Image (cartoon, rainbow, N blue to C red):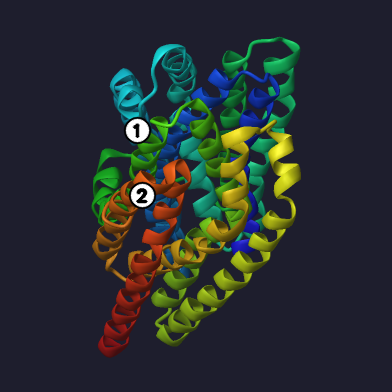
């Protein structure tokens, strides 16, 4: 489940990585920095979709585990509808606030102008991405990991075709990147809806009564999950603002590291979405022994993946920097990431596992508190303190070090929740 869903989730972030690669080939530092600022905001909107998909997949998985396929179909239908509606509202609010958000991140001059232009074109496509992410979660809830994976894989394929045509051949630059993003998200939405319709009974008739009935249990899980997911881009926004003070080269280096992280560790990002349905099904079946086993297997899996990928990043650090035409400070930051900092991502993985466990065991608010603490108290003081001494390198090191304390705390709290559920039977 983790490996296949990671390919699907990585495909979402590969979209951003491909954009970054082609924009960097223009060798325009302003455009590359603009993509960096935009990435922090797009991460914010993507996190909203991830949180909502966690809620929908958890509810569908419980219905599947209880063998109530009619309820699973009803929750799938209402999940898509609610996701599209909230995605549209959220995208509209972000679009209206873009000038203020871009300014808060520290973008100025031509970089700010290009960032705004790119985001104003791409942000309205958010509901399409929301449908795709929810569809992937629904398919994983049915145990259909392969089709869930292909939802976003086809989106990445579409982008890989459109990006060179629109960015380089048509010479549209950031405008081409935004239009290619629209095409990719259209494909993602279509590939999410089709397999649900074709293989899992389609959709139930939609009514206000059903929406109202499903909104309460969905909100119970999805609202804290959304708040939990939003903490990460908020923390990244603080880091972006700090790095902005060191110039566009520093922002470009941070942006490259930010794009590499979810692609290199996509398996870990996917772990929260993969372990959730497994825990949900076993909870619905009353197998709490398997819930505990899934938790510890996920921790071991996380350690092995982080160690292997960090070694690969270290060995490939020079070719990676060359791929993005990174020089000077930008190259230094890429090298810093492809080494000791990537190893410390293990503690972020512990937070992902703990949050997924708590979300599916009825302690979703605990996940919210841990994630926000990690990306505020566990990010800002450390990044600011080390940044004063070591510059932009210190900012990134401080951000990583803060995860150690809160990763260990998250695991301890999740184990406590498991013990409480076992005690209740």
Q: CA distance from mark 2 to mark 1?
A: 37 Å
Q: Which residue carries the number 2 mark?
A: 383
Quadrant of image for the C terminus: bottom left
Residue 313: image x %, image y %? 68, 54
- Residue 60 in sight in this render: yes
- Residue 74 in sight in this render: no
Residue 93: image x %, image y %? 29, 25
Res. 284 mark? none
For marks 2 and 1, the one nearer the N-term is: 1
On screen, residue 287 above or below 264 = below
**Mark 1 closeness class: few <14, some 14–19, many ≥20 residues within 10 Å:** some
Element type at marker 1? Answer: helix
Quadrant of image for the N terminus: bottom right
Q: In the image shown, does 400 or 57 lie closer to the viewer?
A: 400
Q: Which residue carries the number 1 mark?
A: 85
Residue 94: image x %, image y %? 33, 26
Q: Which residue is situated farthest in the front direction here?
A: 389
Residue 384: image x %, image y %? 32, 47
Residue at 30% across / 49% down in the picture? 380
Q: In the image shown, does 313 or 302 lie closer to the viewer?
A: 313
Q: In the image shown, does 344 or 102 lie closer to the viewer?
A: 344
């Amino acid at each position: 489940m983790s490996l296949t869903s990671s390919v699907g989730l990585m495909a979402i972030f590969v979209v951003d990585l491909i954009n970054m690669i082609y924009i960097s080939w223009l060798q325009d530092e302003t455009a590359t920095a603009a993509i960096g600022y935009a990435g922090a905001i797009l991460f914010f909107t993507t996190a909203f979709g991830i949180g909502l998909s966690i809620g929908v997949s958890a509810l569908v998985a419980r219905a599947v585990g209880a063998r109530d396929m009619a309820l699973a179909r009803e929750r799938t239908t209402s999940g898509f509808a609610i996701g599209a509606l909230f995605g549209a509202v959220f995208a509209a609010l972000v679009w209206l606030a873009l000038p203020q958000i871009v300014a808060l991140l520290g973008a100025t001059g031509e970089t700010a102008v290009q960032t705004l232009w790119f985001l104003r074109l791409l942000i309205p496509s958010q509901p399409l991405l929301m449908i795709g992410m929810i569809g992937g979660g629904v398919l994983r809830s049915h145990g259909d990991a392969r089709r869930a994976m292909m939802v976003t894989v086809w989106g990445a394929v579409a982008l890989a075709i459109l990006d060179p045509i629109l960015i380089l051949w048509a010479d549209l630059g950031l405008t081409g990147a935004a239009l290619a993003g629209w095409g990719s998200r259209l494909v993602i939405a279509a590939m999410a809806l089709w397999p649900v319709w074709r293989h899992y009974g389609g959709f139930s008739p939609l009514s206000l009564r059903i929406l109202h009935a499903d909104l309460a249990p969905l909100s119970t899980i999805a609202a804290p999950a959304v708040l939990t997911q939003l903490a990460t881009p908020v923390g990244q926004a603080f880091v972006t603002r700090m790095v902005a003070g060191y110039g566009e080269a520093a922002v470009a280096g941070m942006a490259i590291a930010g794009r590499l992280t979810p692609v290199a560790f996509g398996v870990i990002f996917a772990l929260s979405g993969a372990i959730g349905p497994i825990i949900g099904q076993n909870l619905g079946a009353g197998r709490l022994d398997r819930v505990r086993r899934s938790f510890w297997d996920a921790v071991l899996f996380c350690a092995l993946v982080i160690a292997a990928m960090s070694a690969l990043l270290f060995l490939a650090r020079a070719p990676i920097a060359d791929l993005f035409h990174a020089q000077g400070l930008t190259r230094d930051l890429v090298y810093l990431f492809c080494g000791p900092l990537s190893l410390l991502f293990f503690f972020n993985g512990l937070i992902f596992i703990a949050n997924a466990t708590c979300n599916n065991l009825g302690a979703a608010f605990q996940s919210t508190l841990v994630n926000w603490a990690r990306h505020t108290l566990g990010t800002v003081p450390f990044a600011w303190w080390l940044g004063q001494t070591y510059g932009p390198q210190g900012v990134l090191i401080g951000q990583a070090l803060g995860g150690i304390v809160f990763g260990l705390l998250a695991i301890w709290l999740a184990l406590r929740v498991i013990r409480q559920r076992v005690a209740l039977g």
